[in-house]
Amino acid sequence: MKVDAGPLVTVIIPAFNAQATLPATLASVQAQTHSHLEVLVVDDGSRDQTATIVANVSATDPRVRLLRQQNSGVAEARNHALTRAKGAWTAPLDADDLWHTEKLSRQLNKL
């Protein structure tokens, strides 16, 4: 995996019962042309396979980490991840959204 020389970006993904959409969301993050990332997925008390999906991805991509909490809502999930973020920048992403492969690169170039 090539690591960019640019700043570390923390991608924060709150996830509640997101098994249907989370694999594609994570794939869109992993495909970013800016690859100097940490991806914090907060399982917000899911009752489906959300945590298992994240654990499987993190087994092959050390940039992805699973954080867990009791169901507290999306704002609490984001705040939980912010306390663990190491990046110079943070990028919120919902568990059912997809990013263009150059999204982060383009945003960083504008800064």
Image (tube, grey):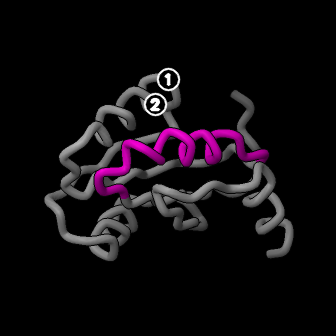
Residue 8: name its quadrant. bottom right
Specify whether 65 is left or right of 67.
Answer: right
Q: Are marks 1 and 2 in contact (CB under 8 Å)?
A: yes
On-image quarter of the N terminus? top right
Per the rendering, the mark at residue 60 is 1
What's under tag 1, amino acid-wise?
A: Thr
Relative image position of residue 24 (x, y in whole percent): 56, 42
The span from disc 1 to disc 2 (Cα, nearest Å) is 6 Å
Q: Residue at x 46, y 56 (%)?
A: 95
On-image quarter of the C terminus? bottom right
Up-down: is 76 above or below 58? below
* Neighbours of disc 2 within 10 Å: few (<14), some (14-19), many (20+): some
Up-down: is 108 above or below 8? below
Specify whether 59 is left or right of 76.
Answer: right
Q: Residue at x 30, y 56 (%)?
A: 16
Q: Residue furthest top?
A: 60
Q: Residue at x 47, y 40 (%)?
A: 64
Q: Is residue 79 visible?
A: yes
Identify the residue position indicated by label 2 in the image: 57
Q: Is residue 5 visible?
A: no
Relative image position of residue 69 (x, y in whole percent): 19, 57
Q: Nearer the viewer, residue 3 or 73?
A: 73
What's under tag 2, amino acid-wise?
A: Val
The span picked out in magenta is 15-33
